[in-house]
Each structure stands twice: as structure tokens, then as C-alpha cells.
Amino acid sequence: MRVLTAIKYSKLSLRAKLFAYMFILATLLLLALVSGMLIFGQFDSIGESTYESLDVQMEWFQRDVSTHFDRLAAAGIDLSKHTGFLIDNYLSEKGLSFDDLNDSASDIKAIQNAMMHPLQQSLRQENCSGVFVMLEATVNSAVKDAELSRTGIYLQQSGYKTPDKSILLYRGSVEAGKAHQAMPHRKWQLEFRSDRFPNYDKIAEFAKHTPERAYFVTDCISLPGTSESAMFIVSPVVSKDGTFYGICGYEVSYSFFRTYYAQPSKIKHLTCLMVENDGDVLDTSSGFSCGVFNGYYREPKGILNIKQENHGLLSFINDDVSYIGVAREAILSPNNAPHMLVVTMLKSDYDRAVIGAIVRNVILMALLLFFAISCCMIFSRRYLSPILKGLEQIKLEDRSQAQSTIPEINDLFVFLSEQDQRYEDSLNALTKEKQTAQSEKNHLQVQFEQAQIAFESAQDKYQRAQQELSTAKTELDRLAYSRKNEIDPDDFQHFKEGLGTLTKMERVIFDYYLDGKSAQDILELTGIKHGTLKFHNHNIIGKLGVSSRKQMLRFAALMKQSENDQQ
């Protein structure tokens, strides 16, 4: 409001004021538009939109992980029960105890041969990279470190990216493997090493629980003799009387994880991690990562420090590269501490998106401001041009032919033309009166000169002149009385009342006329312009109700005579 008042009383031109008013209006409209867009989320920040995108991606990733590991856990429980049942039947048929399997290569081979087909079938049915059974027995207890050696079968599938999946044998009987088209890998070994299997002692302790609560997800380890790392979903294998036979389960390798969990996403360089939860840091070596489907991602390395950002986002920082994303806990088994699921993008991509959004918003606001200013200039020019043109025509002396596209200005032309005509008529009347007065003045001057000559030449006739003067005075009184009787009393009364309505300047001009001053004399005495004098003359005549200056002077003389008679 103060701004509008300041503009109203400023000395700015009409064009500048109109532009200022329109600019303020346009600015208010733009602010209302921007506020509405903000309310309806049209200017959501990159942080919010990034969080929403990553959070949606996290929903998919978390669902995939939970569903997949729950399915592998259920399959591992079934595999554990089936393996325990198979061993129980074999021992019962042979009349053996489980301890009798130690150093019995034939019995171990027979059991492995019986387990080979179910393991291969499980490997093909489940989404995993390998399957295994490791028993608490060894084919040769006399060798060095035999207490750490465990018999069993370990199968992996190669080419899980293609429909034709071949099966490789890493641990177990070669004869049993070849009989079931499982070819030994170049890193094949006959038995497992329990000290190299992650969390083996802890898993053995879970055998006392029910199968549904006994499974466990191991730590991530590097597979011996390879560059691959993997984690295992493990279930204890027990007999129907509770004897601990060993363990079984499924392998999820890093290569399989990257392939299986590749995410369909439009987020550039999307990176998803599943690692152990270490509080404020993430050790990428304790888990796996994957990226976008049919795309590339920057694999995190080393320790990532976690830092809270705005809009619910987290920064994951190390010396090599930084990420920004969201994180959630995921419980993979009842015996594991929660793992951390992380969905991220490169911090550099996020920063570029933020800068791009700022640039776009600045450009948008600049365009809106430019549009508002342009509209203000165009509309003010188109609106004011005919007005200014009309004002220029008003300055012309001849406005009879002036025309404007604005009806109000045309009406003003008509009004001013009428006023000009009135002033012209008044001026003509006053000119005529002046000429008449001048003629009378000249005539009286001639008479005066003649009288002066007569006076100078006829001093001796003074007495007679006095008599004639007295007679003339009497005649003058008679004429004055006669004139008085000729004047309309109402007009004279209106004249006297009109004197009180004259302004200060009008009264000064009136008095000058009574003193016999001419128009030129009054212009010099008052210092006003000729048009202003005409304007005052018109007002004086109008207020006094007389038709001419001559009549005004006649009424003034009569008024003075009346005042003298009263004195």
C-alpha cells in the first residue's frame, strides 16, 4: 500500500506510473501463480523427487531381497528335511550308525549318489548360484587335519544368464557327479574344510531349534581358489532322533547377485547394496552390490561413512567416490542381525541434477519476469499512446478537426472547442466595448480640448461658463437619474451581490477597470497572461450578471453615486 501511495504522489510521468502499477499487478499475479505451483508440488525440490524415486526403488529392492531369501530359506528347510530323511533311510537299511560313515568310502559314495539328483533338481529350481550338503563325516580320518575335513557335495551352475545351465562339481564324489552329468571344476576337491566355512560352529548350535528357526545366512566370504565371493543360506541337517548330521543350503554368489538383483530403473548409475549393519559406516566387503538392468554402475569399495542429508536422504562417502541414497534394515533370518539394504546414486549425478533444477527455475523465473515486463511495456504503450496523442492535439490552437480513438478525449475536444468559442465571443464583446470606450474617450478628449481652448480664449465669459456648468451639472444629474430609472433593479441588485463572490484577483482586476485602466495596463500591473485575463474577465462578467464591461462600469458608477448620496 505504501508503494502504491508513493507511486501515486510521485513526479513520474503518466507512462511510468501506469508501467509501475501494471508491473506490481503482474508481480502479484506471478507470485500467486508460483505459490499455487508450490502448493500443488510443481516446484518440488530435487531432493524430494530424488528421495521419492530412490524410496520407490528401495521398495522393489527390499521386496526382491525378502522374497528371494525367504524362498531360499524355505527351500533350504525342505532340503534339510529331505537330506536327513535320505540318510536315516540309508543307515536304517544298512544297519549302520552315522559314526560308521567315517572312513567308509563306499557308504559315503552311495549316500552322495543318492543325494546328487535331488541337489541338481533343487539347483535348477531355485534362484541361486550353488547348492551343497556338508556332513559330519570324512572318508579318511587318518590324514592331517582330518578333524576339519567334511564329506559332502557342492554343486554350482555356470551360465545362469542363459537358459542352458550346466552344473559343475566343486566338492564330492567324481563318479557320482559324472553319473549325473555334473563335471568336476578345475578347482575341485573331494571334501570341505569346516574351518573355511563361515559361521560353521554357530550354525551347528542352531540344530537344537525347529527347522523353521534354525536356518542362518552366513557372512560373505571369498570362495577358495577363485576371485568370486558368496554367502550361504544354511540349514542344519538332523536325524529324526535329533542327531546332527551336518548342514545344507544354497549359495548366492556375487556374480549371481549382480545379475539376479539388477534393477529396472531410469535412475542413472543406480547402485543397490546388501551389507552387514555396522551403524554409522558400511563395509562394502561384507555384502554385495548391483546396479541397473542392462546398464552400468559404480561398484562401491571399502568403507562408506554415512551422513544425514536433507529430505530423508543419506550420503555414503569414502575417499574414492560418494553416493547419495536411502537405507533400510532387512532381517534375512531369525538368527541373523539385521542387514542393511541401501539404494543409491552417484553424488555427482545428484549434484548435477540440483544445479540443473536451480538453473531451470532461474530461467523459468527470468522468462516469467521478462514476459511480465514485456506485457507491461506493450500494454502501457498501447494504452497511453492514444491518450498522449490526444493531449498533443489539445495543445493545438485549432481543435475543431482533432480526433481520437478514445471517446472521453473526443468529448474533451468538444468541450474545449465550446469553451474556446465562449472565450472568443467574450473577447470579441470586450474588444467592441473597448473600441466603443476608446471612441468615447477620443470624443471626450476632443471636447475637452475644445473646451480648454474655449476656456483659455474666453476668460471673460467665466461667469457665463459657470452658469453653463451649473446648468450642465443639473442636466447631468437629470441624466443620471434618467439612467437610474432605465436600469433594471433586479440586475443591479444581482450586480451588487456578485461583487462579494469575486476572488481576490478578480476584485483587483475589477478595481483596475473602475480606475479606468485598459487591458494592457492590467496585464502589466498584474503580470498575468492575456489568456488568464480573458478567463478572469469572463468570470467577472458572469458573476456580476452583466453582458459587457461597459454595463459593468455603468453599474459601478451608479453604485458609487448611491454611496455618495447616502453620505
Image (cartoon, rainbow, N blue to C red):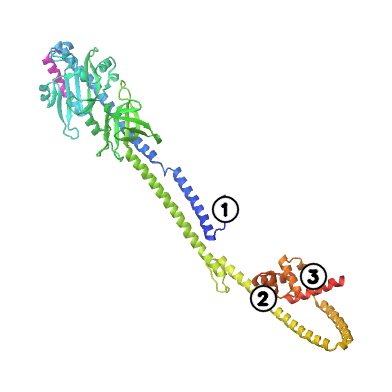
Circle 3 — which element? helix
List x then y, in percent, for residue 464: 89, 87
Amino acid type, label 2: Leu
Quarter of the figure with the C terminus = bottom right
Residue beneath disc 2? 427
Circle 2 — which element? helix
Q: Residue at left 48%, top 59%?
A: 379
Alpha-carbon neighbours of circle 2 within 10 Å: few (<14), some, or many (≥20)? some
Q: Which residues are magenta?
A: 102-117
Q: Is residue 289 magenta?
A: no
Magenta highlight: main SS: helix
Left or right? Give the position of 11 relative to 182: right
Quadrant in which residue 370 is drawn: bottom left
Quadrant in which residue 265 is drawn: top left
**Cα separation between marks 3 and 2:** 25 Å
Which of pointers 3 and 1 indicates the residue nearer the eye?
Answer: 1
**Cα separation between marks 3 and 1:** 50 Å
List x then y, in percent, for residue 334: 31, 21
Which numbered dot is residue 100? none
